[in-house]
Amino acid sequence: MSRAMCMTWRHSSRLFSCCPLPFTSPLLLAPSHFHYIISDIIVSHHHSHLLSSFTQNPSSQSSIMESSPPHHQQNESNGTHNISKKSKPMLISESDLRFEFSHHDPSIARINNGSFGSCPASVTAAQHHWQLLFLRQPDHFYFNRLQPAILRSRTLIKDLVNADHVDEISLVDNATTAAAIVLQQIAWAFTEGRFQRGDAVVMLHYAYGAVKKSIHAYVCRAGGQVIEVPLPFPVNSNEEIVDEFRRALMRGKANSGRVRLAVIDHITSMPSVLIPVKELVKICREEGVDQVFVDAAHGIGCTDVDMKEIGADFYTSNLHKWFFCPPSVAFLYCRKTPETCPELHHPVVSHEYGNGLAIESGWIGTRDYSAQLVVSDAIEFTNRFEGGIEGIKKRNHDGVVEMGKMLASAWGTNLGTPQEMCASLIMVGLPVSLGISSDSDAMKLRKHLRENFGVEVPIYYRHPKDGEVNPITGYARISYQVYNTIDDYYKFRDAVNQLVSDGFTCALFPK
């Protein structure tokens, strides 16, 4: 054992000997597991004091466990939180960046941040601290700590998205939950006779699958009709989307009908397209649409999110996809009007029912709320980059466009959108010779790339139009996040080139 390893072992042994947690002995842990547990406590400079306090003074253990995370200061008497004044953080170094995401599988080119997001080690450490606070004394945590901490996160989000009031911001598990909250009140309006049978809900054809199913489950069963906005793909301009959206609204208003709700994606999932939401919301207002719900699962941290500029009644975005929070947490914005907010309720009814959506969502029974409590830590992480989250968004956009163009050039294909119609994700055409002819082929090819080439990337099947000659039927949705390197995209390029060189076609997959 090397001298460095011995020093690490001595520190870790002291840590485990004084730690009250039911850890497995380090002797029984695989090296990778041992490193993960240790790194969870010493992941960043602003959490390293935990290690020194534990190892140098075991008696300080209680005070550390009782305290909030290092940059949290709580006034227990009034339940308020304040961010302690700190000097401007140093910009993150390349080595620190690699350490923050060292828990990622190094064998995988992870160019699919869009599906599940990514959480740096410093934020997971802060989350773990909150989890321990709960486990140490659940009653104290429930009565004195949880709601002030949730309020703090909601307040930070309110400022981030330029909402008028913190009461307009609720924290929920994910955008799918937020959609259920909005659609539930639409269903009640139908069943209670406030909406008429046949009144419409308009949604994009490329709406997220779970949300589309929720719309049908809540609206159709209650007596409403659903109108889909057909969208072209590849798409060449915002005007194509705007024109189709106007036509869909006209269909909803035919025969003296009413469009009660428009569901608009900010960035569609598959295929990924940045939608001109501000223009579509404005059209909804002009055409008398009752309410507008923007599903922005990929919004915050990926594109510009400003509630006053967008002007929707409801807006939701996941914080775990592009804002570095752990899974899963999302915010739901509800524009504060007498007509909307009182009608919203969390679908899980608990003791806070009737106290407003934000309070209802803050307690839906015993569960792990820690993902909702680390928004400030995620903000602190983004502030370690030049330009903060705005700088990250710009570099991610520029990076994904550059890598998309590189791949399209290598394969002789095209991008699915102009660069101004993407954010941190972009669609890249795959070689026609791969023979992607169904959604099943796309899923099998994705699995093949993962298991045989170490590339994780979603594949989209595009149904060819009548009369098309040698159409591109397969598109890859690539993401770009701060942890990605150019080698990730070269690995993908080379994998596809190898498949083409070998004469591979999806017809070779077992049926």
Image: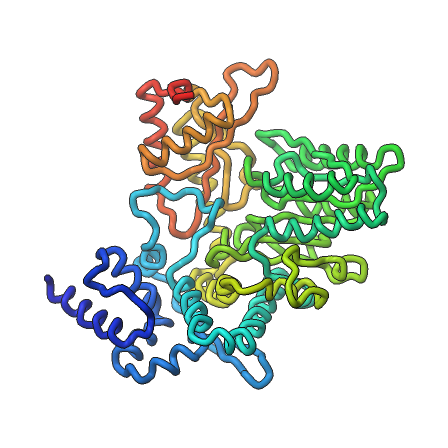
Label count reads 0
Work out whether residue 311 can be spotted: no
Who is closer to the viewer here, 311 or 25? 25
- Quadrant of the rendered image containing residue 21: bottom left
Q: Is residue 440 above or below residue 74?
A: above
The picture quadrant where one finds residue 152 is bottom right
Relative to 327, does residue 202 appear above or below in the rendering?
above
**Measured from the top left, where is residue 315 in percent x and y?**
66, 53
The answer to whether residue 196 is seen in the rendering is yes
**Does residue 395 lie above or below 508 as drawn?**
below
Specify whether 243 is left or right of 388. right
Query: What's the residue at 33%, 35% (across, down)?
Result: 451
Quarter of the figure with the C terminus:
top left
Displayed quadrant of residue 231? top right
Residue 196 at x, y percent in the picture = 85, 42
Whole-percent x and y of residue 274?
A: 59, 42
Q: Toward the viewer: 16 or 102? A: 16
Residue farthest along the right direction in this orientation: 256
User: Where residue 301 appears, x then y in whole percent?
Assistant: 53, 54
Q: Nearer the viewer, residue 214 or 381?
A: 214
Instruction: Name above or below for residue 358 compared with residue 217.
Output: below
Q: Residue 497 vs residue 88: left or right?
A: left
Quadrant of image for the N terminus: bottom left
Q: How is this picture coloured?
A: rainbow
Name the residue at 33% across, 83% down.
60
In percent of the image, x 35 and y 42: which residue is there? Answer: 109
In the image, is 212 to the left or to the right of 111? right
